[in-house]
Image (cartoon, coloured by chain):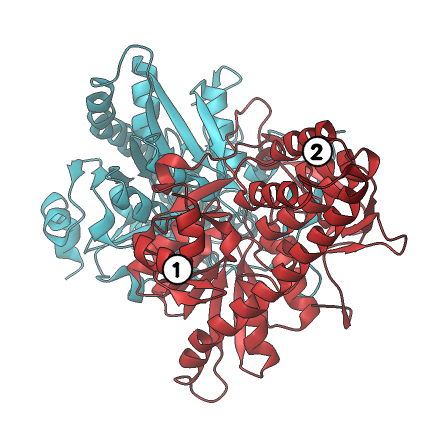
Chain colours: A red, B cyan
Amino acid sequence: MKVDGKPMRTIWLEPDGWSVGIIDQTALPHRLITARLTTLEDVAHAIRAMMIRGAPLIGATTAYGVCLALRADPSDESLERACTVLAATRPTAINLKWALDEMVAAVRNRPRTERTAAAYRRAAEICEDDVAINTALGHAGLPLIEAIAAHKKPGERVNVLTHCNAGWLATVDVGTATAPIYTAHDKGVAVHVFADETRPRNQGASLTAWELGQHGVPHTLIADNTGGHLMQHGQVDLVIVGTDRVTANGDVCNKIGTYLKALAAHDNNVPFYVALPSPTIDFALADGVSEIPIEERGAEEVATVTGRTADGRIETVRIAPNGSPVANYGFDVTPARLVTGLITERGVIAASRAALAGAFPERAAAAE
Amino acid sequence: MKVDGKPMRTIWLEPDGWSVGIIDQTALPHRLITARLTTLEDVAHAIRAMMIRGAPLIGATTAYGVCLALRADPSDESLERACTVLAATRPTAINLKWALDEMVAAVRNRPRTERTAAAYRRAAEICEDDVAINTALGHAGLPLIEAIAAHKKPGERVNVLTHCNAGWLATVDVGTATAPIYTAHDKGVAVHVFADETRPRNQGASLTAWELGQHGVPHTLIADNTGGHLMQHGQVDLVIVGTDRVTANGDVCNKIGTYLKALAAHDNNVPFYVALPSPTIDFALADGVSEIPIEERGAEEVATVTGRTADGRIETVRIAPNGSPVANYGFDVTPARLVTGLITERGVIAASRAALAGAFPERAAAAE
């Protein structure tokens, strides 16, 4: 999507043809900084430190992590070590595991001399596939927004609420939850986004609001507590969120707090949609609440906030009293019963075992 | 309650016998600073700037605002002006209007020479009544916690989730939502509190966690997004929140985000209680969602966060991109259907018109 009026992606090969460029998302929204990754360790650090985040982008970056490991050492041991190191960076993201499986399959039976080139080819494909899938999500979700727009009076906008960042910054480009929004906006449909700030890491404030603003999409930043009130007062037409993992039953694991917005949407008859590229589906799991491991992160993410001072310095300030313990769960699970529909690259389907298996029979069969 | 091991209140008469001391709550949790209020304007500023906040404490402070106005000028015009100025400070708090009515009734038919003394007497009564009511809330709510404790295994704690600060810092002392918690803790019941940080102003992080810590109550600070996940996993035994206004129907207006926690509690069969001193009941209103005006506050509360740097400076940092619009609603309304019970100074009652009118017939009759 556009930054300062020019198209940009979140990850790219540098002109040297092998090192990997990324946007360091920890510096947004205040500074646009890029980083160059040259080793497996660089990639693992970038994922762990959330310089890149978002399930699809984690997958793409993971793929390039394998490339860099094989470029340094194309042995089986190096491949295994890369998988071990990368798999440990973020336990909740199914795309990470998916990308590792894809990369291993692409290089396993090849001679060592061919492995690096094969890995780079597959990583590039994973990136292009992500953009193609997200473009398809945009076209699949567009009619949902157009149908609401058709009932608006002149001058009224379609109000979409989203949580966290499932925007182009969470993918290689276009985004998942934002795909229908960008598609509608670029087509001239009047759309406005309520962006949850998404504590504790504020991805909504620092990433979603930033990317919507850069692309010119009207939006309003709100505290995470606000969505229920807005829905009670008819100010939200639909909710679209992304996801880190969807079970075979249609349960949706996404950034902590998503479940609360799904409850509010259900209570106010506001449609609640989840946009997902199919690699996010985990057909090996059934019940999301009991089966998906939820990442716990450090206390400092809740106890402190980082931002820009009035005179332009980046500072971290503590908001909690000294000595107060903190709990920091990264994700929650929204039961399928609260999900109006899943926006996939093969169309909008119900959040149910039958619909998921029907739309992705090859994936469902492979998991059996 | 205790600060550094010594009892303290949120508001007091200074040794001069007329000026009013308060804790400047905007400096918490990093510094304990007190302020001395000597004029009506001091009081209005303290309320507007949220140096003091919380419905009962707003009521008590408002009462002293009338005292200071009458001390400077005991005329009817001065009394009217005080009411106008104070009523405009926070539109949602019913206690503010209640306290003004009480003060006007206490001085209206008196000669000017007696008005100031009468006002100070009534203000002191309002403070003592608040403490007595909150003590009664504690005794009324204690059995709810004890009943859960009775079913815990040895070493297990009763887990209470609360939102915002309805602690002693929101009242003259003891608190409303915290009253049953402090009463149980002081009696030796093992209780642990999950404190929502409560964006955008972080009253849970800066006030609730601080006062619980000062009094020695075990607690854990969490992002507002977390409560649903905790409830899904059986980590919350009950929710107790305060309120700024309860309608005759039992609809509960409280800090923005309360409604989302009520939905999560309902979805997970977690009891959801609201602790309220009876001045918080507004028998003139029926439907909370449509009838209660919701205060909108400044964008900077969402766009920025204030805290303490590692080297001890207080800094305000911006988390939002430049140019992103912000919406900042202060409260939401939890419909009575989601409320398990109301903890009042006359016992725990249902959140219904019949139960409220039954428990407070003199208030209900006066509103007709």
The local crowd at label 1, few if under 14, some if 14 to 19, many if 20 or more residues have their Cα within 10 Å, is many
From the image, state whether disc 2 or disc 1 is nearer to you.
2
- The residue to which callout 2 is attached is A79
- Residue A19 in the figure: left or right of residue A356: right
SS for callout 1: helix
Answer with the quarter of the image where residue A74 lies: top right
On what subunit does the disc labeled 2 rest?
A
How far across and how far down the image is residue B72, in percent?
52, 50
Residue in the picture at 21% in, 19% down: B151
How far across and how far down the image is residue A270, in percent?
35, 65
Q: Does the rendering let one see residue A55?
A: yes
Q: Quadrant of the C terminus of chain B?
A: bottom left
- Name the amino acid, label 2: Leu
SS for callout 2: helix
Residue in the picture at 74% in, 34% down: B313
Answer with the quarter of the image where residue A83 lies: top right
**Same chain for marks 2 and 1?**
yes
Give the mark, 2 or 1, whose residue is nearer the N terminus.
2
B360 and A88: which is toward the camera: A88
How far across and how far down the image is residue B273, in percent?
26, 39
- The residue to which callout 1 is attached is A229
- Name the amino acid, label 1: His
Q: Looking at the image, how many numbered discs can be counted on the residues?
A: 2
The local crowd at label 2, few if under 14, some if 14 to 19, many if 20 or more residues have their Cα within 10 Å, is many
Answer with the quarter of the image where residue A134 lies: bottom right
How far across and how far down the image is residue B27, in percent?
61, 36
A191 and B347: which is toward the camera: A191
On what subunit does the disc labeled 1 rest?
A
Q: Say above or below: A68 vs B320.
A: above
Q: Say above or below: A165 vs A142.
A: above
Distance between the alpha carbons at the discs numbered 2 and 1: 50 Å
